[in-house]
Amino acid sequence: MNRHQEVRASRMTPRKLGFRAVALYVALAMNASCVTSVDDTKLFENGSDSAMSEEAPDKFWIPDTISPAAKAKMEALVSYARAYQTNEAPAVTPEDWQARRQVREQMMEVFNAPLLERLKPSIEDVILAGIPALKVTPNTPRFSEDIILYVHGGGFTYLSARSSLKSAVLMAEATGYTIYSIDYTLAPEAKWDEITMQVITAYQALLNDGHSAGQIGFFGDSAGGSIVAGSTLRLRDMGLPMPAALLLHSPSTDLSGAGDTFTTLAFYDPGLEKEDALYRLSQYAEPDDLKNPYASPVYGDFSIGFPPTLIQTGTREMLLSDSVRLYQAIEQEGGEAVLDLYEGMPHVFPSLLDGTPESDAAYARAKKFWGEHFKSKPPG
């Protein structure tokens, strides 16, 4: 690794988990298929021998090289993820999409409730030039004019500002900054061109409210990371001032799935399914647009300017190459980028495995990153 790449690891004692809630959360937050019932006799089944042959790769294998706390949490998640495997057919009709979104929304709101009760953030419905959003402020106010515009994940097709509150709240709590989480129109109802313009519209509204570009950061996870990076390329090309910095968690940056790990780690990713991912990626752009840089930012031109970018991801996800390639594209064309890589961590691990040393380290690094690039004095 060169000087721009950073790896963090530490250890702590395992904590007890709310098992059934965690099981459903991993099926949703890691973008796995969702079911509405499960055979309870399978909940404590190991499954490593019965679920697959000795020759087949075990996507739920957990390395000993992660922290004890992360390993304990992953073991609980894996136990339940095995039980929640399903061959759900792809959504096709508007009714299909709506029904599945409704289930995910209801369940995620239930699972977010304990965190919201514990941290007690302020959550306010706001409108940013016609774009609905949630304004999330940490319970303990920290004086700063800097803010973060957050774009949630969900494979471009699922979740909302409300159901993805965990990511927004954890970032607000860890850094002290107010987060604006926008509700963009999901695919397939909208494609990349409409969705990125909604992000740009919300950004312009914050500028018009008196914030300077240097006081606004962009944050996106998974599909949201792709939307954030693509929106930044587009607003730059429109002649708008670019935000102070970008923070991306496990971004999906190439809709074509061309990256090495999209194949080599496809059978070892505990949370993502390759065919399901490709299907949902296809909902975001027409075939002719799969390599449009606003839709697949890894193909962007970064030689004419791009904000400092921190990319945080783990070695246990098939989208790893999407992070590596975006990092290389920015850094090799003279931009400032950091690839903050974590051993054995799955997709969007900072919010998925919150409370572990790896997650804590990622949020601590994020706080430092924002403070280095915002123009105002950092909070706290």
Image (spheres, rainbow, N blue to C red):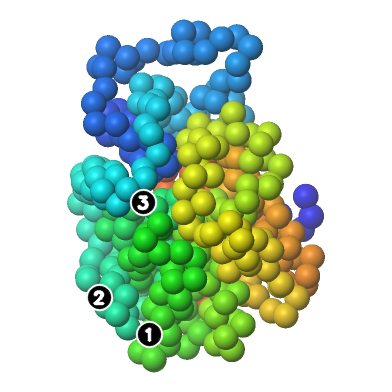
**Is label 2 in a helix, a strand or a loop?**
strand
Q: Residue at x 27, y 34 (%)?
A: 21
Which sits in the foreground, 191 or 198? 191
Query: Along the polypeptide, which appears first: circle 2 or circle 1?
Result: 2
Residue at image point 77% right, 72% down: 334
Q: Quadrant of the C terminus?
A: bottom left
Identify the mark nearer the N-term, 3 or 1. Answer: 3
Q: Residue at x 51, y 51 (%)?
A: 281
Q: Quadrant of residue 119?
A: bottom left
Q: CA distance from mark 2 to mark 1?
A: 11 Å
The numbered mark at residue 158 is 3
For residue 265, above or below residue 1: above
Q: Kindly identify which residue carries mark 2.
A: 126
Residue at position x 48%, y 58% in the image: 284
Q: Could you tell me residue 142's position as x and y percent?
A: 35, 73
Mark 3: few/some/many CA within 10 Å (<14, 14-19, 20+): many
Closer to the camera, 7 or 242?
242
Tally the numbered discs: 3
Q: In the rendered view, would you say 185 is above or below 260?
A: below
Q: Residues within 10 Å of mark 1 (few under 14, many from 20)?
A: some
Nearer mark to the viewer, of 3 and 2: 3
Q: Read off the residue under disc 1.
A: 205
The amino acid sitting under disc 2 is Val
* Cβ atoms at labels 2 and 1 below 8 Å apart: no
Q: In this rendering, would 358 be left or right of 110?
A: right
